[in-house]
Image (tube, rainbow, N blue to C red):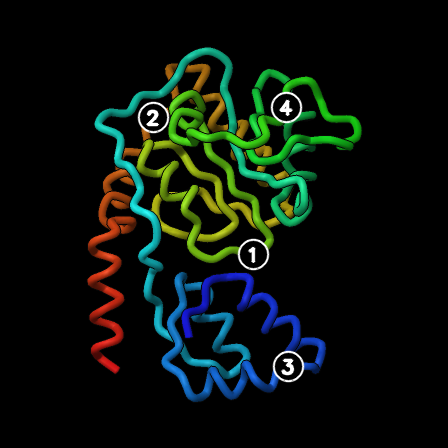
Amino acid sequence: MYWIGTDVLNALRQAEEGSPNPVLEIMARQSVNLAVASHLVVELRHIGIESKHVPFPGTSLVVPDSVSMPVGAMSVVSYVPDTRRDFYGLPTLLAAARELTDTRFKIFRGHGEGVEDAPPNIEFLGYVPDVGKLLEESNVFVRLVEHDGDSVTVGEALLHARPVVYTYEIPHTIYVPFGDVDGFVSVLQSLREQHQSGGIPLNVAGREWAIGAYDADWRFANLLDALLEE
């Protein structure tokens, strides 16, 4: 069984509610259990499932030949679909946008219809066909998600050498707990000070790490090795 994120969240909630899925439990006990992220390994252990961290060998990510940091007003980009605004941290993003009025917030995937009192410095872009170009035009990438697996967009942002603010602790990102408005605003204020006093440094270490960590060939080979060990 390959655990990827929401399936773990559902299993945790079912166990907490005292109504675990019996079919799922039997399958898990009889299977080799792999998890796409290290935090999922910990979560599965809470419900008696031992698993191994094996990153998912999904879509190959494009590694930009060169990276640079845009100038002008600092811009923050985040993924928030309209159907799961709270889950993807829109309330926190809106609160930060109201606090940091000179910072631009760009939300892709969502159109923002029905969002009340959205400040003028937040823009809803809807579907964006070229996320790489959006990252090139932005200074900071944010993923404030209640629960996650192995985020492709975090990988893309790191490959573009952007500072990444994330609700999970992975290498070369800035950790902010989900729903922590004050902590999030404080991080952005610090980045804005850097931006205004010479520019936010490129996240070179994050880019170098991501080139290896998100390499599709390595991920496929790693998955094969994990299966052959069983």
Residue at image location 73% in from the left, 26% down from the top: 118
Q: Are marks 4 and 3 in contact (CB under 8 Å)?
A: no
Residue at image location 46% in from the left, 30% down from the top: 129
Give the residue at mark 4: 122
Q: Of label 4 and label 3, which has the lower sequence position? A: 3
Q: CA distance from mark 1 to mark 4?
A: 24 Å
Give the residue at mark 2: 201
Residue 208 rendering spot, x and y as whole percentages: 23, 40
Q: Is residue 219 left or right of residue 52?
A: left
Q: Quadrant of residue 134?
A: top left
- Closer to the camera in the image, 64 or 164: 64
Other-residue count near label 3 (Cα within 10 Å), few / some / many at <14 / 14–19 / ≥20? some
Residue at image location 44% in from the left, 42% down from the top: 174
Q: CA distance from mark 2 to mark 4?
A: 24 Å
Residue 86 rendering spot, x and y as whole percentages: 68, 46
- Closer to the camera in the image, 44 or 111: 111
In the structure shown, which secondary structural element does the residue marked by tag 2 occupy? loop
Q: Residue furthest top?
A: 72
Question: Depth-wise, is mark 2 or mark 3 nearer the camera?
Answer: 3
Q: CA distance from mark 1 to mark 3?
A: 19 Å
Give the residue at mark 3: 20
In the structure shown, which secondary structural element does the residue marked by tag 4 occupy? strand
Q: Of label 1 and label 2, which has the lower sequence position? A: 1
* Residue type at the position of mark 1: His
Question: Depth-wise, is mark 1 or mark 3 nearer the camera?
Answer: 3
